[in-house]
Image (cartoon, helix red, strand yellow):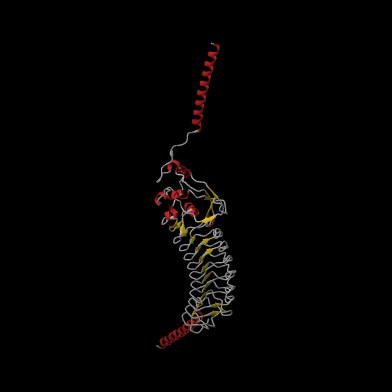
Amino acid sequence: METSTISRSRRCSFAHTFKSGLSLWLVVWLVLVKPAPVQGCPHLCVCYPSPMTISCQAQNLTIVPTGVPDESQRVFLQNNRITELRVGTFGFGTQVLWLFSNNITWIESGAFSEMRDLEELDLGDNHHLRRLEGGAFRGLERLQSLHMHRCRLAALPHDIFHKLYSLQFLYLQENQLHFLQDDLFSDLINLSQLFLHGNRIRTLSENVFRGLVNLDRLLVHDNRVRQVHRRAFRDLGRLTMLFLFNNSLAELPSQAMRDIDSIQFLRLNGNPWSCGCEARPLWDFFRANRISSSELVCASPSPRRGLDLRFLREMDFALCPLPDPGSLAGTTTTTFSTKTRWWFSKHKPVSTSKGIFEKSSETVKAYPFNGGKPTSTKYELSEDEALLPKLDPEEYWANYGNEDAGATMRCFELECAPDFDVLPPSSSASFSSVSSHFSLIVLLSLSLLTVNIHLLFG
């Protein structure tokens, strides 16, 4: 009996010791394993430990809060009333900084210079930010994404993007930009997407996109673009998407189109396209490239108003000189297809005055022999040219690239040339015919000679 009691006592003692040890190990595990709370979280902010995130959004803050931990990876300050960003404001090494929807009016040069690891900066929807100082983004050489949409920016300093070599996404849409100066983006060698839509840009100059050798998407729609320089796209050899719809374009130069030979998506609708001779380069571009495109409705000349430029046919440009594809200066030739030459030999327009027409990238200049002075005017269709046969879209694509296919080409809405389907006689047949005629002439000559000899000698 006594032995049994001792044994039970020992078991209870062992169980108590085991439980005490387990509790001790549990406390140690909780201390070592459980994440420690974030230390020094700024007032009115919520902080999260992994990844280190400081969220101070929508707190009516007028300045950037102090005490943000240096190891913070993401700092969210959107939807506040912050007005200025000065040097020394940001002493933390974050990767993502959101400042959109504030009242920012001024960013001091070098305000972000200590944020060497910053990869994404969002300053969008700051409606009072109308100008930027040069060097505002100095030091952000690791920045990959920069948002400045809807800020009412009217101009950009020439060095605003200086040394932003890592930038891939640049959002400048829905500002009030009137002009983009040359070499503005020249350091952005890794830029992939550039958003410029919804501004007031009027022209795209020769060097405006210089340096953007890796650009994939360019959105310039909903602007006021009237003119594109023929070399404006010369560095955009990798561009696959170009949006230029809802602008004021009447034409695009041939060289500009040749420089974007990798394009896959092209939107040009909502422009007042002129479909006279100046439309020939763009028409040629669509014939040579099968891409996804919008409609291109002609605004002029009046006989072609409402037609789709893409579905015009070669006959519609038969009176126009063709651009020389090997020339960057836009010199012209007058090479037409066989059928086009035949049609005009039969339906040659009657002209009461003579003139010399020169095609340039901007206008067709007429130099009538009137004593002197050349006049410059947009090309307008004559009545004879307006009568040229037209091809509907289905017929056009059915014979796409097959204009001189001889007997395999059907004649649409025009009379076929005589012997259109008859092959020319072979060289051997021609030689045989000539030989027969020569033999007959020789026989006749011999006969006449025999008659003359008989009369002379009786």
Quadrant position of the N terminus in the picture: bottom left
Res 116 quadrant in image:
bottom right
Q: Residue at x 50, y 46 (%)?
A: 336
Q: Residue furthest top?
A: 458
**Location of residue 121 in the rendering, given as x and y in whole percent from the top left corner:** 52, 73
In the displayed structure, would residue 185 be above or below residue 34?
above
In this view, the residue in front, 239 or 57, is: 239
Against 94, residue 227 (above or below) is above
Q: Position of residue 255 (x, y in %)?
A: 54, 55
> Count the marks: how many?
0
Q: Position of residue 279 (x, y in %)?
A: 48, 54
Where residue 419 appears, x then y in whole percent? Answer: 43, 37
- Name the residue rendered at 53%, 21% in the picture: 445
User: For this rendering, which residue is in front, 164 or 231?
Assistant: 231
Residue 289 visible here: no
Of 258 and 66, which appears nearest the observer? 258
Query: Does residue 107 show up?
Result: yes
Of residues 33 and 173, the one nearer the viewer is 173
Q: Residue furthest bottom?
A: 2
